[in-house]
Image: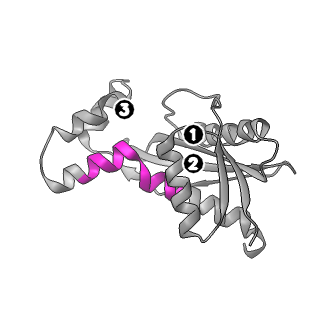
Amino acid sequence: MKILKIAVGTTSEQKMGYVEEALSELGLKAEIVGAEVKSGISEQPLTSEETKKGSANRAKEALKENLKADFSLGIEVGYHLNPNGKYEIFCWASIADREGVVASKESHRFLLPKFYQKILNENKEVHQHLEDYFKTDSDPIVQYIAEMLRGRKPFIKNAVEQVLISYLKREEF
């Protein structure tokens, strides 16, 4: 099996670790290289469309940064108002290649607890309050949710796995 060379539009060790986990779970061998790139969108995207655009922009920019990469990967986490007027968290992951193909996939969505609904409705930035939610309740489920939202792992891994599958096995779909 060929070892893939993938440029990733982030320098976050945490996100790079999630990419490595997704690759491993799919049985893929890859050399990944992070690149500090801009998303070209707001710091806290509040629509699915903007979040998708940010992930695609990161993928395209990462490809420019690493000329040896087979393709690149962009990751963007965002929030979106659902039809009930409540915010959900999700992730978009995009792949860009040298043939001009850009593939994007969205993760599952998760309804944010009231604590974060209030923060977003007050136009505050979620990342500044991630540790605060841990202090709201010692209940194990609340602590699980707090960790899930702080690390965003399930959303990032889900989107990355989906986009890798759809890109690398596009003839199957």
Q: Earlier in the sequence, mark 2 or mark 3?
A: 2
Q: How many marks?
A: 3
Q: Nearer the viewer, residue 144 or 66?
A: 66
Q: Earlier in the sequence, mark 3 or mark 1?
A: 1
Q: Do labels 2 and 1 touch, CB within 8 Å?
A: yes
Q: Classify 10 Å Cα crowding around label 2: few (below 14), some (14-19), many (20 and above).
A: many
Q: Secondary structure at mark 1?
A: helix
- Residue occupying image coordinates x 51% and y 33%: 45
x, y (%) of residue 65? 75, 35
- Whether residue 143 sits left or right of residue 38 in the image: it is left
- Whether residue 81 sits left or right of residue 64 in the image: it is left
Give the amino acid at mark 1: Thr
Q: Nearer the viewer, residue 11 or 173?
A: 11
Q: Do labels 2 and 3 touch, CB within 8 Å?
A: no
Q: Classify 10 Å Cα crowding around label 1: few (below 14), some (14-19), many (20 and above).
A: many
Give the amino acid at mark 3: Val
Q: Classify 10 Å Cα crowding around label 3: few (below 14), some (14-19), many (20 and above).
A: some
* Residue that mark 2 sits on: 92
* Residue that mark 3 sits on: 126
x, y (%) of residue 105? 61, 55
Q: Nearer the viewer, residue 56 or 11?
A: 11
Q: Quadrant of the image for the C terminus? A: bottom right
Q: Do labels 3 and 1 touch, CB within 8 Å?
A: no
Membership of 55 in magenta stretch: no
* Residue that mark 1 sits on: 51
Q: Residue furthest top?
A: 123
Residue 163, image quadrant: bottom right
Gap in Å between the C-alphas at discs 3 and 1?
15 Å
Tell me: residue 173, above or below residue 74.
below
- Whether residue 82 sits left or right of residue 68 in the image: it is left
Q: Main secondary structure of the magenta part?
A: helix
